[in-house]
Amino acid sequence: MSASPAREINNLSKDRRLDWMGQRRFESMDAAEILGWGIKKFGRNLVLSCSFGAPEGLVLLDMMQRLDPGARVFTLDTGRLPQETYDLMDRVRERYGVAIEVVFPDARAVEAMTREHGLNLFYESVEKRLLCCRVRKVEPLRRYLDGVDAWVSGLRREQNVTRADTPKVEIDEAHGGIVKLNPLADWSSERVWSYVREHGVPVNRLHAKGYPSVGCAPCSRAVRPGEDLRAGRWWWERPENRECGIHLDEEAEGSGI
Ligand code: SF4
């Protein structure tokens, strides 16, 4: 049996991988072209990551469903999401007829963490917050992505200082060298919202209450006028720490506790 496209890529040297990627070609492609390329190249081994807490994932879901009604979408249910996010998942199921693949954390790992550190450990230190994100998000994601060849994320360069260099297509070294597509890397927030309005894309109701980005309930809040778009996530930490580890490499995930 021949190796899957991503495993073939993973076996190449770094220089040859970059050749294969053709970074400059992807940079000149628009979001729909990148998704079309990914669907053609990876078929059902391509999955969209949608948090249902930001419009970007819903824009990509809408685009992918137009290109391929069988396109796969998954989400991480950390166990701490607000009700508005679950409501949106059901609205999307009804609107698109898509079977959302809901991924849960390992129950024993959550039990051990909460037994040792309590339920609200994330407020106590960056290390404990990263531990919670690792148990509830990073490890379940790693487990899930182990079974696919490529994934799609809604990262945009202007979202945070940590995302300024996001390429449109990259090799995801932190997840076994699979391919990661960031089709909206060069989109502005205004462009995302104009796509939502134009196509009637369903979004999280908390956006209308001042939440630009909705994550877990205890770690998300509304932002005040003039504040940074991501100021409502882990607001008690410095901006350079405000990632969950999902889009960072192993080293940047933090050392845990
Ligand atoms: S966002 Fe907060 S509650 Fe959710 S996994 Fe991270 S630390 Fe835990």
Image: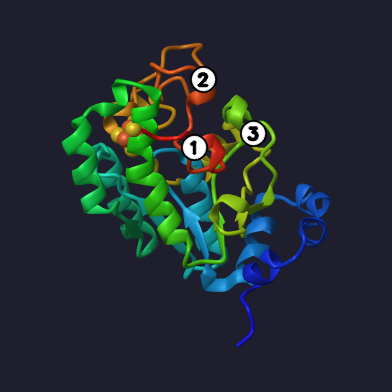
Is 59 on the left or on the right of 202, as rendered? right
Ligand 1 quarter of the rendering: top left
The residue lying toward the viewer, choosing from 255 and 145, is 255
Residue in view at x 60 percent, y 37 percent: 156
Q: Which residue is mark 2?
A: 239
Q: Which residue is mark 3?
A: 157
**Looking at the rendering, which quadrant does residue 84 occupy?**
top left
Mark 3: few, some, or many residues within 10 Å (few <14, many ≥20)? Answer: some
Mark 2: few, some, or many residues within 10 Å (few <14, many ≥20)? Answer: some
Dot label at residue 253: 1
Whether the residue under disc 1 has CB within 8 Å of ligand 1:
no
Q: Quadrant of the N terminus?
A: bottom right
| Residue 88 visible within the image | yes
Q: CA distance from mark 1 to mark 3?
A: 19 Å
Residue in view at x 35 percent, y 65 percent: 99
**How many numbered marks are there?**
3
**Looking at the rendering, which quadrant does residue 249 occupy?**
top right
Q: Farthest bottom residue?
A: 1
The kind of residue on which mark 3 rests is Arg
Q: Residue 16 at what x, y percent from top left?
A: 81, 61
Is 46 on the left or on the right of 19, as rendered? left
The kind of residue on which mark 1 rests is Glu
The kind of residue on which mark 2 rests is Pro
From the viewer's perspective, is the residue at label 1 or at label 3 nearer? 1
